[in-house]
Image (tube, rainbow, N blue to C red):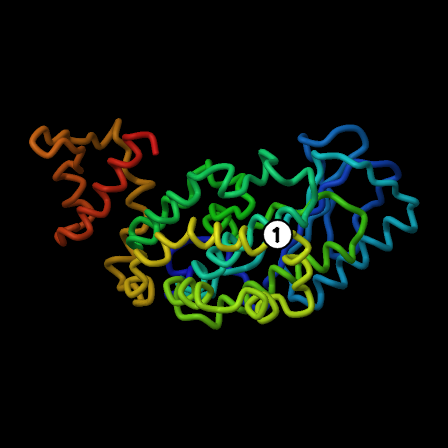
Amino acid sequence: MILSKLVRVKSVEDKNEVGIEVEVEGDNLPEAPVGWRRIEDGSLRGESAEYIFKRPVNRRLATTYLTRLSNAYIENGTQVLDSARQSVHVHLNVQEMEMNKVFNLITLFLIFEESLVKWCGEYREGNLFCLRSSDAEDLIASLEMASESVLQFPILQRDSNRYAAINVSSMFLHGSLEFRSMRGTDDFDLIKKWMNVLLKLKDFANKILDPSILVSMISAENPHELVAKIFKEDADIITADDEWIEHMYTGLRRIQVMAYLGNWEEYAVELQDDIIGRRNIYEDFNPDVDGRIYDEEENVWVLPEEFIEHYGLEDEYYVTSVNNYINRNMRGM
């Protein structure tokens, strides 16, 4: 199944796969060139702005848009400050990607995350607005839960995932994965390179059936040949890190539980109408209104019968999935 079967967002054509946000603090900032809009960002200081694509565009046009903003900087004599507050965010449209391939893309990024974030700049490592999975392990826990069942996929929209280096909650707002690691810069060739590296990850993710196969393949391949195969002419982004091989295997170990225990067969099946109607169970369930029952014998919280009947959850499998979700959240996970 594809992502758009699981989330309700404004539809974007698959070919329009890139959106970019450039945050900047500096002097003589230009007006937004064609294809961009300029807004104020309360997290920035002094003369500042955030430039955002008006809409997602294809790869070629994304490169053109970046060149336009670069030229606007030059023509306006823009001076960009060296500030930890500014950054560049890249959105990749995944609305029409098969769900297993979406998880492949997430898996690939997390495997190479340490080296990728290191390349993005010293301010970005450990930055609270683009946390690596090694900084905040809640993302890995969320991914493991979501991979168990389609019905647990909405776990990924938690606010705690929003400021990860890879923002998976963006799938529920825009149908995209947001990559938040790149530092603020006036070097637009650097931004283009970063965008192209992320697109290479997406292209490679689309070639592999599911994360279990992806992780097995990466475990077995020669690291140098693997990086050349995935990143091609941009492999230096990874190999610039003196410890990239060690970091790659650490990332591999961090994500392998999700990869091997994920229910990829379920994610590969097209949803039926009656199951699609259950997508918003998590949003609709309000414990203060719907109540919840504590089963003392089993030592768990369970859904009230009226709620089960309302959603037609006759199948014990689905009741169990939703009950698991509630119990995890009751424990503050």
Residue at 65% from the left image edge and 52% from the top image edge: 241
Location of residue 6 in the rendering, given as x and y in whole percent from the top left corner: 37, 56
Residue at 80% from the left image edge and 53% from the top image edge: 69
201 relative to 121, above or below: below
- Residue lying at the far left of the rendered structure: 297
Q: Nearer the viewer, residue 315 or 11?
A: 315
Location of residue 289 in the rendering, given as x and y in whole percent from the top left corner: 25, 29
Residue at 64% from the left image edge and 70% from the top image edge: 232
Among the 4 quarters of the image, the one containing residue 59: bottom right
Which residue is labeled 1 in the image?
116
4 relative to 29, above or below: below
- Horizontal side of residue 272 vs 70, given as left or right: left
Task: Check the picture and name the quadrant holding the N terminus.
Answer: bottom left
Location of residue 177 in the rendering, given as x and y in whole percent from the top left corner: 53, 53
Q: Please state the total of marks drawn on the protein image.
A: 1
- Horizontal side of residue 287 vs 183, given as left or right: left
- Horizontal side of residue 260 vs 207, given as left or right: left
Three-letter amino acid code at the position of disc 1: Leu
Q: Nearer the viewer, residue 112 or 49?
A: 112
- Horizontal side of residue 279 vs 180, given as left or right: left
300 relative to 237, above or below: above
Among the 4 quarters of the image, the one containing residue 201: bottom right
Task: Check the picture and name the quadrant holding the C terminus.
Answer: top left
Numbered disc 1: secondary structure: helix
Location of residue 251 in the rendering, given as x and y in whole percent from the top left corner: 48, 51
- Mark 1: few/some/many CA within 10 Å (<14, 14-19, 20+): many
